[in-house]
Amino acid sequence: MSSEEFRRHGREVIDWIADYYEGLESLPVLSQVAPGEIRQRLPPHPPASGEGFDGILKDLQDVILPGITHWQHPSFFAFFPANASGPAILGDLLASGLGVQGMLWATSPAATELETLVMDWLAELLDLPAAFHSSSAGGGVIQSSASDAALVALLAAVHRSSGGASEVGGVASGRFTVYTSSQTHSSVEKACRIAGLGSGALRKLDVDPAKQAADPDHLARMLAADVEAGYTPALVVASVGATGTGALDPVGELAELAHSYGAWLHVDAAWAGVAAVCDELRFLNAGLEKVDSYTTNPHKWLLTNFDCNAFWVADRRPLIGALSILPEYLRNAATDAGSVIDYRDWQVPLGRRFRALKLWSVLRWYGAEGLQQHIRGHVALAQEFASWVAADDRFELVAPHPLALVSFRLRAGDEPTRKLMDTINSSGRAYLTHTVLDGQLALRVAIGSPGTERRHVLGLWELIADSMA
Ligand SMILES: Cc1ncc(COP(=O)(O)O)c(C=O)c1O
């Protein structure tokens, strides 16, 4: 592709994206295609000769678009949001254009230094403890996902608990255990499997039925029993904004217990953590001064396209100890001098994209005030939606909703609740998902799309009423 062709098609692509956003509201939120339908409409074999870009854009419009669930749609209330924004898209495009692979400081110094800076900026915007800043013993890194963050936290924890033995003897001999609540995201169990501990190493903590938050007394009992039985507690994961209901675990209490047994405390605040840009929501940070690592996803609710997970450690040595292997072909003067950060040592893969560019674009374009406005708007809408649910006898709120997730069910039971969800989703006018709490189905309305306004939330409420009529 020549520069001229690139300019021409590049403009067409930007126009296509802008048109897509302008017309988004008229599209069905949840894709209505059947399994296999999209593939069937595409050629089974790759072209022998190159094709023009116009044909690619045409197929995108005609064939691919019907198979898209529109995560940026203002009536997308499913799962948690996966925000995109103009500055993030452009920042990512620039990263693609530069095409750097920033595995080492030496392979693109600016990629590393900008990442360190934006992670410090984000820590400051969220008012995180000083230990997470790069000027301390800790620091931040961009991972691909909160699942990656859980995995590297576990690897660092096992490394520390084993006194570095993970470098030589592996983890199997350690009989390490991991603790988290039954509401915590499944990524923690997956991390146990990937790390070689197996799902059997994971202990699920009971939750308080009203708040769905982890019970510290249960943790205390499990830790004592496991140590008695010869296990080594390596990691406790606290959730701040658990996936099902947004539950907030008592982080400080869990951290104190973890530390009294030499275990690492990791906080998974994948969705909720970014809301601490707002002063009035800083209760989300309670206890963080006691934890070993913390993660939140700008790619969920902070206007930064997937993938962009922010992960901080209070002490970077166990992380680097667990993940650093320096073969001869990666050696260079800066690494040997120990004067730089090599982010390959903070993650599982070697290679890494220049993701800091899009986060930098977002933080600069919106500033603290723009980010606060984005979060505050959604929290206010969720509070209003929850008040409508609370005032209607047919429904029951099932968990506290201090942020922008409202979980509720029909008092009539699981069957009508599921039917309501299916009717809404198949209408294409809104999309929401479910969870199971205490054996009963509950619907989740997560408000967080950048374009969601009051009229969309009101529209959902009307759709709910119509679907039940
Ligand atoms: C609390 C929590 N943790 C972890 C994850 C996994 O996020 P990721 O896709 O970044 O791995 C999610 C996803 O929704 C989540 O809600």
Image (cartoon, rainbow, N blue to C red):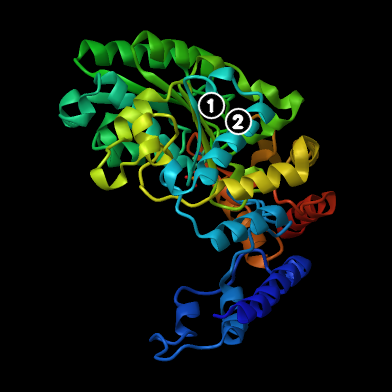
Q: Secondary structure at mark 1?
A: loop
Q: Is mark 2 within 8 Å of ligand 1?
A: no
The amino acid type of the residue labelled 1 equals Ser
Q: Which quadrant of the rendered structure holds the N terminus?
A: bottom right
For residue 112, above or below residue 273? below
**Disc 1 crowd, CA 10 A, few/some/many (<14, 14-19, 20+):** many
Q: Nearer the viewer, residue 382 or 399?
A: 382
Disc 2 on helix, strand or loop?
Answer: helix
Question: At which x and y percent is residue 286?
Answer: 61, 18
Number of labels in the image equals 2
The numbered disc on residue 323 is: none
* Image vertical order of residue 104 relative to residue 18, above or below: above
**Mark sitting on residue 120:** 2
| Residue 151 visible in the shown view | no
- Disc 2/disc 1 C-alpha distance (Å): 7 Å
Classify 443 as above or below 170.
below
Q: Which mark is residue 134?
A: 1
The first of marks 2 and 1 along the sequence is 2
- Along the line of sight, the residue nearer the viewer: 9 or 396: 9
Q: Residue placed at 55% from the left, 74% from the top? A: 33
Q: Position of residue 333 (x, y in %)?
A: 36, 38
| Side of 160 relative to 418 (left or right) | left
Query: The C terminus lies in which quarter of the figure?
Result: bottom right
Q: Is residue 306 left or right of residue 337?
A: right
Residue farthest toward the top in the current orientation of the protein: 260
The structure residue drawn at horizontal position 22% and vertical position 18%, both measured from the top left corner, is: 231
Seen from the viewer's position, the closer of residues 241 and 33 is 241
Q: How would you rate the neighbour count of disc 2 (Cα within 10 Å): few for under 14, some for 14-19, many for 20 or more?
A: many
Q: Quadrant of residue 282?
A: top right
